[in-house]
Image (tube, rainbow, N blue to C red):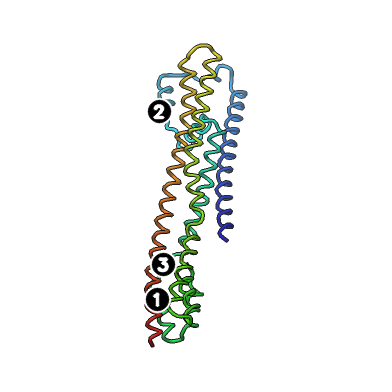
């Protein structure tokens, strides 16, 4: 189920990205066709409008949308390397979103669950408490159910069973975090690699021309640095998601430990009765 959610999330992100690219290309094609039509239908003397200082100032002051600027910088930074860095962002976000959904579904109101388990033990015994845990979602309910299954073997066995099963659940909560951290490390590394290759291409152009031209050097350095900037941005975004996931897991683990202690105390009281 978790793999299915991750796959659907990734497919949605990829579909959204491809749709935006296709729509942008369609808009550019339509604009080019419109320009060609206007040039055909317009008289010769009206094809080139008079460029007055006012018109030039209006065109210079026209704000550029964020999407247009991002698309322009993406193309300038070599779509090959920028596409690889974008792929790390998509995969990292897909894993992070899947983990966020899983951890949020694993969150349980432990105090309410403890009250239900204690009431069930007093009124219906162990079997009633098991039914409450089976009908409750989350790792805390799974730990309680594991302890109730070992109740007849003594409290020592219950405590050991809870500790062992708690370690298994902690591993499930942390599943996938290593991949998110991998994409965090890969994004700036890929950006730096694009920077190095861009610098090599700039020097190749200088060697081919035989002269150091500021235009050639500036253009090569600009393309090289754009990959680094984009890689760092991707790493920052994924790092924020990673820190949120770590804090969420720590909160769940602390909740599991506190509730397990209270649960053992409830079982001890029930044994004394």
Query: In the image, residue 177 lies at what x, y percent?
Result: 48, 52
Q: Count the marks: how many?
A: 3
Taking 55 as reference, is 25 above or below it? below
Identify the mark at residue 2; answer none if there is no mark: none
Q: Marks 3/1: CA distance?
A: 12 Å
Secondary-structure class at tag 3: helix
Judging by the rendered image, the residue that carries numbered circle 2 is 61
Residue 52 on image: x %, y %: 43, 19
Residue neighbourhood size for the residue with mark 2, other residues' Cα within 10 Å, grouped as few (<14), some (14–19), many (≥20): few
| N-terminal-most mark, 2 or 1 | 2
Q: Is mark 2 on a helix, strand or loop?
A: helix
Q: Look at 61% across and 26% down and name the residue there.
A: 36
Q: Which quadrant of the figure contains the C terminus?
A: bottom left
Question: What's the distance in space between the residues labelled 2 and 1, CA to CA?
Answer: 70 Å
Above or below 225: residue 266: below
Identified at 57% across, 36% down, the residue is 27
Q: Earlier in the sequence, mark 3 or mark 1?
A: 3
Q: Which residue in the structure is indicated by mark 3?
A: 256
Horizontal and vertical percent position of residue 160: 45, 72
Seen at 55% across and 16% down, the residue is 45
Q: Nearer the viewer, mark 3 or mark 2?
A: 3
Classify 10 Å Cα crowding around label 3: few (below 14), some (14-19), many (20 and above): many
Circle on res. 264: 1
Which one is in front in this view, the residue at disc 3 or the one at disc 1? 1
């Amino acid at each position: 189920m978790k793999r299915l959610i991750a796959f659907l999330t990734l497919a949605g992100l990829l579909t959204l990205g491809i749709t935006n690219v296709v729509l942008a290309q369609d808009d550019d094609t339509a604009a080019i066709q419109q320009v060609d039509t206007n040039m055909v239908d317009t008289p010769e003397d009206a094809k080139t409008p008079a460029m007055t200082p006012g018109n030039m100032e209006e065109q210079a002051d026209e704000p550029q949308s964020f999407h247009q600027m991002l698309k322009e910088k993406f193309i300038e930074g070599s779509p090959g390397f920028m596409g690889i860095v974008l792929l790390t962002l998509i995969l990292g976000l897909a894993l992070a979103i899947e983990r966020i959904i899983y951890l949020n579904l694993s969150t349980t109101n432990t105090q309410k669950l403890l009250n239900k388990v204690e009431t069930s033990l007093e009124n219906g015994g162990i079997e009633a408490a098991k039914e409450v845990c089976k009908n409750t979602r989350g790792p805390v309910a799974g730990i309680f159910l594991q302890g109730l299954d070992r109740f007849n073997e003594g409290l020592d066995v219950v405590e050991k069973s809870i500790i062992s099963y708690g370690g298994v659940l902690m591993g499930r909560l942390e599943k996938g975090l290593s991949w998110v951290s991998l994409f965090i490390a890969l994004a700036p590394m890929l950006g730096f690699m694009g920077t190095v290759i861009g610098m090599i291409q700039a020097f190749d152009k200088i060697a081919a021309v035989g002269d150091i031209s500021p235009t050639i050097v500036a253009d090569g350095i600009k393309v090289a640095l754009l990959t680094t900037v984009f890689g760092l941005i991707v790493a920052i975004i994924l790092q924020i998601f990673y820190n949120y996931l770590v804090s969420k897991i720590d909160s769940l683990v602390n909740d599991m430990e506190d509730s397990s202690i209270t649960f053992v105390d409830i079982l001890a009281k029930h044994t004394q009765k």
